[in-house]
Amino acid sequence: MSPMSLEAMAASIPDGSLVAIPPDNSLPSVALAKALVRRGAHDLRLLGVPVSGFATDILIGAGCVAEVQTSAVSLGEAGFAPRFSAAVRAGSIVVRDATCPAIHTMLQAAEKGVPFIPLRGLIGSDILANRPDWTVIPNPFAAAGEDPIVLLPALSPDVVIFHAVMADEAGNVWVGRRRELATIAHASARALVTVERVVPGNFLEDERLAPGAINATYIEAVAIAERGAHPIQLLDEYGFDADYVADYARMAKTEAGFREWLQREVFEPARLAAE
Amino acid sequence: MSDIKLEERLAAVLARLILDPTAKPARHIAVGAASPIPAAACWLVKLQDHPVRLSLLHKRSGNPFTEGTRELFDLTGQGRIDLFFLGGGQIDGGANLNLVGTGDWPGRGVRFPGSFGSAFMYPMAHRTILFREEHSPRVLVEKVDNISAPGTSPPGVFRRGHAQALVTGKCVFRFHPERARFSLDSVHPGETIESVRAATGFDFDVDDAVPVTEDPTEAELALLRGPVCDEMVETYPEFCARVFNRKMAA
């Protein structure tokens, strides 16, 4: 397994793709999101699994996104996501509201290779009323006509992007306790993973590492991006950079401020690195 | 003991609701995003030596789940979560919650972050305590613009629990699912039935005499300011600095 470059990885994601992204407590690849901005991606359909945060707000602000399916978009303690809020106000993106367990469950159906899956709750919520792709049937195992239950279609993203701590020589990646990422990788046609480092050996031959590993079967490619989750926490490797996110939240309140932030934090560092 | 802060009062009120002897015992409580006061209430219960398991979703180290939030929803689907906390950008007199936004779908007026897991957690947890510190007519509305999660469900729809209570910065309401209405349970010091009515957009039931919300005891305050703060300072540093005047060691 030899890593590819971050920019080549971004180039391999076609415009219009359905891209699954984990939230800010579960190893998003901010580095790859920034690379997608640099390559000028457009019409991406983002899927927050199950909610969306910093990376999604940048991609929306930079005009890369046509649609977002998610259960919430937020910068956590830094407040509402400013570019998402502006896009909803302007009507410039399609928002398909979901609820967290529905997103997990639709991916679990794809992981199993079944066309649909039932889920409790949701009945009486306007989320269900605004999802023509979700349906309600009577529980076929209850007495006739009783116990209505929601059916969700399987959901298979074109690609999932996330940031793992490390990859091994065999192409397995290690995500520690964030094993929900395995479900997304299993359900997606492609998994593109940035990592802090590539290490010798094979995680699956180590009892202590194997439970936090995702098998290379599901991983299409790995790119090295040091501090690739920053400003988001990466397990016990580095913490959340609250000042960086608060600065973003302040600047991205306006379109001009956001453009200035993009120049300083996304375009300029890459230009300097290339020199 | 120094003056009681509102946050301390609210944490103590929530702790008493958690321990309500008329409710099914809360053996496993989950606390979601950005909820320092409910988290403080849970720690207050646990540190009073009540047998309770706490799953704090946003704990920065030692997160309780190894399958992310997916595990929380599976636990709740099975009925293993006894108590959950929810809030809302709008909450109405039928305990319907709006976390999506005001105006037309999907929140073309003011967009809130989104529904999170509420459409599932509210009906599937054994009980839910609603908590929203801001008590104003823009939050407590007659009818929510959009329903993220309904307060009650039609007969025949599987539902495990409802709102137990709604706690705000002004009062405690109890919810009565059989008539889908709130009643005023107590008013915090300085508030009256009239001041609560003036700040509330929905109609609610009032008994002849509504008591003042009990103060936290000296023992509760000592726990909150000491051991509860110790447990919370890593996840909620700003809250602990502001309320308990505690700075995290560098």
Image (cartoon, rainbow, N blue to C red):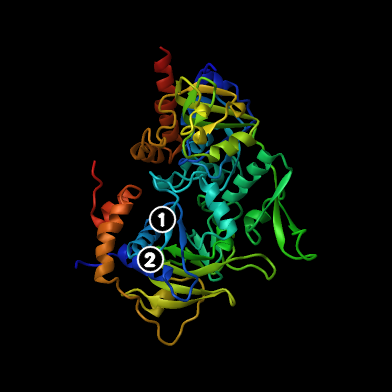
Dot 2: within a 10 Å radius of its alpha carbon, few (fewer than 14), some, or many (20 or more) residues? few
Residue at 68% x, 50% y is A131
Mark yes or no: residue B103 visible: no
Helix or strand or loop: what does disc 1 sit on? Answer: loop
Residue B13: x %, y % from top left: 37, 69
Q: Amino acid at mark 1?
A: Ser
User: Along the polypeptide, which appears first: circle 2 or circle 1?
Assistant: 1
User: Would you say A98 lies left or right of A143 here?
Assistant: left
Tag 2–tag 1 contact (CB < 8 Å)? no
Cα distance, mark 2 to mark 1? 21 Å
User: What residue occupies the far top of the structure in this picture?
Assistant: A275
Chain ID for label 1?
A: B
Dot 1: within a 10 Å radius of its alpha carbon, few (fewer than 14), some, or many (20 or more) residues? some
Residue at 33% x, 75% y is B214
Residue A113: x %, y % from top left: 71, 39
Camera-nearest residue between A241 and B192 = A241
Q: In the image, which disc is placed on residue B35?
A: 1
Helix or strand or loop: what does disc 2 sit on? Answer: loop
Position above or below: B223 against B62: below
Position above or below: A43 against A142: above
Mark yes or no: residue B66 visible: yes
Q: Which residue is mark 2?
A: B50
Residue A78: x %, y % from top left: 39, 45
Tell me which corner region of the image, top left, top right, bottom left or bottom right, holds residue B11: bottom left
User: Dividing the image into 4 quarters, which one contains the N terminus of chain A?
Assistant: top right
User: Dividing the image into 4 quarters, which one contains the C terminus of chain A?
Assistant: top left
Q: Amino acid at mark 2?
A: His
Chain ID for label 2?
A: B
Camera-nearest residue between A130 and A263 = A130
Residue at 50% x, 70% y is B24
Position above or below: A268 against B234: above
User: Would you say B81 lies left or right of B155 here?
Assistant: left
